[in-house]
Amino acid sequence: MVHLAGTLRITKLENAANNAREAKLNQKERLDKLVLEWSNINRSADAEAAEETMLEDLQPHSNLKHLQICNFRGTRLPVWMKDGLLQNLVTVSLKHCTNCRVLLLGRLPHLQHLCIKGMQELEDWPEEEFFPSLTSLKISICPKLRKLPSFFPNLRSLKIKNCDSLKALAVTPSLMFLILVNNHALEDWKEASVTFLNSDSQPIGQLRSYVKLLELKIICCPKLKCLPEEGVPPSLVHLVIQGCPLLMEQCRKEGGGGSDWTKIKDTSLI
């Protein structure tokens, strides 16, 4: 079993009892993808606490590239995740880990794709988390998440859905695809530019968000009052705005146009 390679999926982990350490996943250096899944059923408080120990015991080898955890009921992620011990991770998916309150993934230099779904108690994503290679981020059904890390330098695609406490986005100078759905508190585009300094602390350039957008969908985000201050870029080819009364009023064409009409008049509005 030490030479197990490729993808390993372990389901119904609630039945594993105290045998998780025997799997010796930290010795499986040829594993490329690991899926750890509990059944989506109610558990006692004692069982939920035991899952934290179990997940610690299921630490994979540092060569792992793809990790998915489903229906974990512990209140915290394992040390081997928050300390960034899996430096080769390319993809992380956390689905219905309903009791985790803080997202601690450590510094993952190669992480490209991150999916966070159904983390009902998630409140905090610390600022020190930094993902220089992240290109795709999907967050959905995280009603208590209040904020994101402030800067994603290479993010290309961002989808946020049903995050009722999130008020602001992040600075994303490379973003090309942005989908926002049912985020009832969202009100800040977070357009602040990032200034780069040389060795003498002199500014050598700035990066702003939304300058590379190809697609923008905004659906049922009622607190958004306007489009980004700099408008939408010429590159934008697909724009959808629905269920956002304040924003739609500013983008109206009728009656001489709203204050944001000039930002989108050359764009195909669907």
Image (cartoon, grey):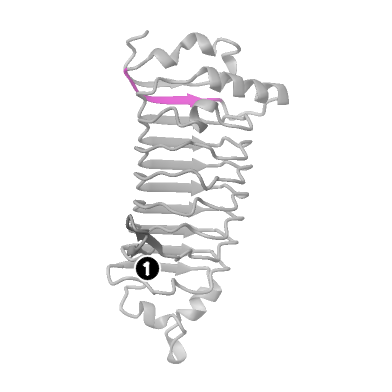
Residue 35: % across, % down = 44, 26
State whether residue 4 is above or below residue 143: above
* Viewport quadrant of the N terminus: top left
Tell me the quarter of the picture where residue 238 sits: bottom left
Residue 3 forms part of the magenta stretch: no
Q: Say left or right for 152 vs 184.
A: left
Q: Say left or right for 142 vs 262.
A: right
Q: Classify 10 Å Cα crowding around label 1: few (below 14), some (14-19), many (20 and above).
A: some
Residue beneath disc 1: 239
Rendered residue at 49%/36% (across/down):
105
**Can you name the residue that lies furthest to the right here?**
45
The range drawn in magenta is: 30-38
Tell me the quarter of the picture where residue 39 sits: top right
**Can you name the residue that lies furthest to the left here?**
235
Can residue 220 be seen by looking at this rendering?
A: yes
Rendered residue at 52%/12% (across/down):
21
Viewer-nearest residue: 108 or 34: 108
**What's the magenta bit mostly, secondary-structure-wise?**
strand
Determine the secondary structure under disc 1. strand
Residue 134: % across, % down = 37, 45
Viewer-nearest residue: 107 or 234: 107
Q: Say left or right for 4 vs 124.
A: left
Which amino acid lies under the numbered mark 1 shown in the image of this protein? Leu
Q: Say left or right for 121 vs 161.
A: right
Tell me the quarter of the picture where residue 186 sits: bottom right
Rendered residue at 64%/42% (across/down):
121
State whether residue 160 is above or below residue 37: below
Residue 118: % across, % down = 56, 42
State whether residue 137 is above or below residue 14: below
Viewer-nearest residue: 35 or 208: 208
Residue 90: % across, % down = 35, 35
